[in-house]
Amino acid sequence: MSSPAERYAAARRRAAQASAFPALDEFSLDLGFDLDDFQREACEALERGGGVLVCAPTGAGKTVVGEFAVHLALRGRPGGDAPATRRKCFYTTPIKALSNQKYHDLVDRYGAEQVGLLTGDNAINGDAPVVVMTTEVLRNMLYAGSATLEGLAYVVMDEVHYLADRFRGGVWEEVIIHLPESVTLVSLSATVSNAEEFADWLVTVRGETAVVVSEHRPVPLWQHMLVGKRMFDLFHDADAARKHDVHPELLRYTRDTMRRLELGEGRSAGPGGGRRGPRWRGPMRPDIVDRLDREGLLPAILFIFSRAGCDAAVQQCLAAGLRLTSPEERAEIRRVVESRVTAIPGEDLSVLGYWEWLDGLERGLAAHHAGMLPAFKEVVEELFVRGLVKAVFATETLALGINMPARCVVLERLVKFNGEAHVDLTPGEYTQLTGRAGRRGIDVEGHAVVVWSPETDPRHVAGLASTRTYPLRSSFRPSYNMAVNLVGSVGAAPARELLESSFAQFQADRSVVGLARQVQRNTETIEAYGAEAACHHGDFDEYFALRVAIADRERAIARQGQTQRKAAAVASLERLRVGDVIRVPSGRRAGLAVVLDPATGGFGEPRPLVLTQDRWAGRVTPGDFTTPAEVLTRIRVPKHFNHRSPAARRDLAAAVSGTGLDRHGGRRGGRSRQAVGEDHRLSQLRVELRAHPCHACPDREEHARWAERRRRLERDTEELRQRVSGRTGSLARTFDRIVALLTARGYLAADGEVTDAGRMLARIWTEADLLVAECLRRRVWDGLSPAELAAAVSVVVFEARRDVDERASLPRGAVADAVDETLKLWGDIEADEAARGLAVTREPDLGFAWPIYRWARGEALAKVLASGHQIDGEMPAGDFVRWARQVVDLLGQIADSGGSSAELRGTARQAIAAVNRGVLAYHASA
């Protein structure tokens, strides 16, 4: 109980704060809760008139600072309450789902007439004083000089750490650099370890910026590991967590478990008990959910880094008879679901697995991943936030999305597929995922559970849970669209200076200091190595140069042999015909195979489609052949053979085996090494080596080891020097090369003015912007029907999730001709980029042409999804909708483009109408 004097002093402090920060006092009265110290500090900095960077953990309440900026804008200028004195606030988010959620939050607080929404799909009340938008929308406004920017006073950049995203991150920097000086910037970020560096950059480009960093989680997070059926705390207490000291009991139990596995106790008994190596069966997914339910840890998000794994987890829980909902909750779930899916045609629902999905929802279980229909994902999100769905199996994309906090988060593995390879989770990703645990105002504490397996070291988990070193790294790089927009708005020389003020260049310039120090240290070490390599018999540098020359010559001869072997393999594959039986000499597909499609026409190396006697069907490349492919015999291949049919593959593979030919032949496909000694230059070098005085030195090999170390360090040091020179002004140099390419292609005039073609390019917002502009200029897409146009433009936006061996087929006729022309233009651009040392434009991907073509022609969803060029079956509905939306977005740009013919613009609008039906119509209106 405080004394009267203490209460009086506290009242005086509150009164002083209210008089110093009247707007914050007004704002906090309506909140219904007391501001945390970091929230108050950031809001006070804003009311003083400066910008602010707020870094705080997920769920800490950063958005309150953004909402205070909205309050300041609506409050008007000091001393005026009339609407004329009111200012604008733009609230930007990285994804549409977050924009939609924030829009509804602000409408609830300020009313629909005060708040607008602008995303790629929606435009609601865009002239309102407060507008929520995706970051790309604001970037496009800045380049277009939109009248909507008039009166703009505040810009809130939510999730500003997205500027590290390698695909879209540059947009955040473009906005920060190009915003008028009069605009106050509010940057909200997850906790990053280089907040001060980022803030230093913000000060250089935006002026006064306060940095407010909070490591404190409002809801404490407890870390656990589930080992079999036993749950352990990862740390004994908070002090142990700070020191990364794993709970001794957990370490002891996992060590004992590993020992039992190695001794064979973990293996199944019976006939399979003799299997070699340890075998571990972790807890089943239904058992994990049941355990969480019994311990009062639901609702929970269980992260499984695989779409198929998420769907399988729900099915496993259903098969196990799990039911987490009451009859009342089930009725409410069905009511919500039925109200949300009324716009989706009935025949499509069965294709989308609607009934199985609904069964899971009614039991409180759901998957959440990018392969799901967006409408289904939105329902899952709503039901989970309302506490009706208790367990969601999700990929990591959920951690980057909308606000879906849980009581508990479970990580099934600490490895994920990043699109190219399986990689370990970083500390930043671990924190982002586990940050979902603990709902402010609902839970007293949050819980993160890692499922143990023999590959999971508890000490590694402790490191992930305790590490705070995840710096923000810029991914900014100039693009063609950016170049013409910058040159058009400020001119070539000022544009170059603007690029040099980017965070990317700021970081590069800072890193140069460290690299230069390393070069100096290396130079001193090289001198020391040189002294150790000195030989009293003669010049050891000269002798060592002969040894290096011999090794280089031997490698060159070996490469020459490889080139000759590859040329022979290519020639032999080009001669193959349907029905030829060949032997694949090496690799995973080694053995006999029959040719199904020679595929020698047009695109690079021959990649014949074959069927092996092991029933694998796919394309082989010259790299699979260490010797030329030899036709051993011929067999008959049925005329309309379908290599996707298991039965057809089985019958034809039996015919291959029935030839009686030996699977591996009489000799292995070894490399016929040319005798390197036959080379005259090599023989001459060896004679010189033996004649050198240092060759007789008894310490020759010791000297050579020091000389080799020096050579490697010299090579590394030269690379460092190149990096130093490359980073100094690197973005400006890239910009100069882009400008030179655009000038050569007629998008910029020799005097730096933007041409008509350049103005068209300035309004194309896609990764393949220059390729799209070239297609429009060359009239590649003119004369196509709406469905054909949708298919033709899809190749420049679509990108398959994984590499597919064979090239996707295309609708014949006009589409195939347009795509061939697009590929030729891409080849020209790629050659131009490579010659100038620029990053090359991604090759067009044909994998979405058939699905979008069929959809635009009005065919059924089931048929459309089945025509997707996927290795593992039909295209997921979520992927189809996402790529279809991107096709629609590009069609919209073509429809509005001044560089398109009137006929093409009309066709583009018809194509948009044809695509926006069924599941797409729902998505367009959602």
Image: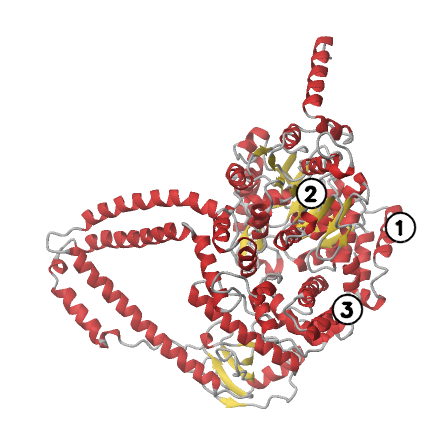
Q: Can you say whether 136 is above or below 630 in the image?
A: above
Report the amino acid beneath label 2.
Answer: Gly
> What residue does disc 1 label?
331
Mark 3 neighbour density, 10 Å: few (under 14) some (14–19) many (20 or more): some
Q: Can you say whether 824 is above or below 483 in the image?
A: below
* Image disc number at residue 151: 2
Q: Can you say whether 563 is above or below 430 in the image?
A: below
Residue 75 rendering spot, x and y as whole percentages: 74, 34
Tell me which residue sits at (40%, 49%) in the image.
Answer: 728
Q: Earlier in the sequence, mark 2 or mark 1?
A: 2
Residue 605 rendering spot, x and y as whole percentages: 48, 78
Q: How many marks?
A: 3
Instruction: Compare residues 61 and 111 and report the one nearer the observer.
Output: 111
Report the amino acid beneath label 1.
Answer: Ala
Mark 2 neighbour density, 10 Å: few (under 14) some (14–19) many (20 or more): some
Residue 368 rendering spot, x and y as whole percentages: 71, 54
Work out which quarter of the rendered image holds the C terminus and state it.
Answer: bottom right
Q: Earlier in the sequence, mark 3 or mark 2?
A: 2
Residue 814 rendering spot, x and y as whole percentages: 65, 81
Does residue 449 appear anywhere in the picture? no
Instruction: Compare residues 666 and 559 and report the one nearer the observer.
Output: 559
* Image disc number at residue 55: none
Alpha carbons under labels 3 and 1: distance apart = 37 Å
Closer to viewer: mark 2 or mark 1: 2
Q: Can you say whether 690 is above or below 426 in the image?
A: below
Alpha carbons under labels 3 and 2: distance apart = 36 Å
Mark 1 neighbour density, 10 Å: few (under 14) some (14–19) many (20 or more): few
Q: Earlier in the sequence, mark 3 or mark 1?
A: 1
- Kindly state the secondary structure of the residue where label 3 is placed: helix
* Image disc number at residue 913: 3
Closer to viewer: mark 3 or mark 1: 3
